Amino acid sequence: MGGVLSSGGPKCRTSEYNEMLNNGSCKRQKTSSISYDEESSRLIPFLPDELSIQILARLPRFCYFNLRSVSQKWKATFESAELFKVRKELGSTEEWLYVLIKDEADELSWHALDPLSKNWQRLPPMPNVVCADESKRGFPGLWLRNVVGSGIKIAEVIRSWLGQKDTLDQMPFGGCSNGAVDGCLYVLGGFSRATTMRSVWRFDPISNKWSKMTSMSTVFDPCTGYMV
Amino acid sequence: MSSSAENPTLTAEITKPSTEIATETAQSAKKITLKTSDDQIFEVEESVAMEFATVKSFFEDAPSSTDTVPLPNVPAKPFSQVIEFCKEQIKFKANPDETEKKRSNSEFVKEKTNEDLVEMIPVANYLEIKDLLDVLNQAVADRIQNRSVEYVRSFFGIDNDFTSEEEALLREEHAWAFEDVDED
């Protein structure tokens, strides 16, 4: 039902549209008498926020980082679940690929690829050192995970770009495992030097923040794969 | 028996339509009078006016009304552009051609100024013209995509409510997020 807004074809007749309005899935504001205060707290001064959010949801996601600086309200909106709900309704969600990279200096960092704009960006560092191990092998560890959707094909493409298709599966990951649940990236356990860790970290792409989850009750077997 | 008795009436009905067709054509060319918020009067063909869900439901409630329909939230300037869009749309109703429709829509937004586009959004919303609203939202998104923060602020007339420290911090984060990226 929520898809009516996005289906937008010529067959979308007004009766259907009205029905949607009545269902309340798309609240339209029809009043024009608004105070100055109300206007200044809006995303776009002369538009109700329900309409403005329809515009913002049509922007490619890589624009969001830059446009957060427009105003406090814009920043809050780009970090809100509401905007991503509208994107879902519009079918404008994007699949980004998240890659854990270990560089020559044995630093681990997460990077995200937006396949549409072909832009890479670095995620904020995880709040503590993650599981650097087997560093003596001397080549970057790579870990691929697509948070939204299946994206197997994308992973394959990246693997072939990097020319590491064959060796990828045997690479040293430092022993932590990861998975994707409900659009968030999870990193579980892993090594820190010789000790195993129970910690679980979650990265939320909407707020662009890492947060620590409740630790696991048992130590995670470092070699176990974890798929969701 | 009864059928032969009915025949005369049938022929009578067949001869009648000439006048009915005449009234029908008169109806399809019927104009609806609409008054904008700045008191401009628009005479719009009924078929075009029925594209406005708000106006359509007005006539569903009062089918025989010949009154002028007031549009209190609609100024004349964007309204005339909205009419232009709907006139085009009607052509595709009789003859649906998605490619041609897309081309026509992009032609429509291409020749509009930024101001035209944003002024039409509340009008399209008030009149509940979903197709136009989709076209406008996308067109505005396309125009601010990849633009600087300053450009977007002046596009919409948004005041910067960050302190200079806050803003510097955000930009620093942004620069960092894209440190490995070539800007195009």
Image (cartoon, coloured by chain):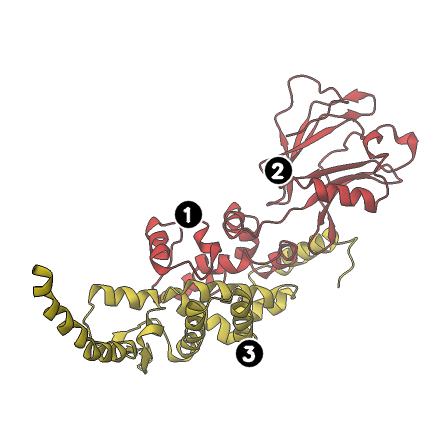
Chain colours: A red, B yellow
- Of badges 1 and 2, nearer the viewer stands 1
- Residue for point 86% across, 36% down: A106
Label 1 chain ID: A
Estimate the x, y position of residue A72 in percent, counting from the top left.
55, 56
- On the question of residue A124 being in view, the answer is no
Total label count?
3
Q: Earlier in the sequence, mark 1 or mark 2?
A: 1
SS of the residue under disc 3: loop
Q: Which residue is mark 2?
A: A184
Letter of the chain that mark 3 sits on in the rendering: B
Residue A128 image position (x, y, % from top left): 74, 34
- Please identify the quarter of the rendering in which residue A154 is found: top right
Tell me the quarter of the picture where residue B131 sits: bottom left
Which mark is in front, 2 or 3? 3
At x 78%, y 26%, the residue is A175
Residue at image location 38% in from the left, 59% down from the top = A13
Do the residues at discs 1 and 2 belong to one chain? Answer: yes
Residue A1, numbered label? 1
Task: Give the SS element for disc 2.
Answer: strand
Q: Are marks 2 and 3 on the same chain?
A: no
Do the numbered discs 1 and 3 sit on residues whose CB atoms are within 8 Å? no
In the picture, measured across the screen, residue A149 lies left or right of residue A104, that is left
User: What residue is disc 3 on?
Assistant: B111
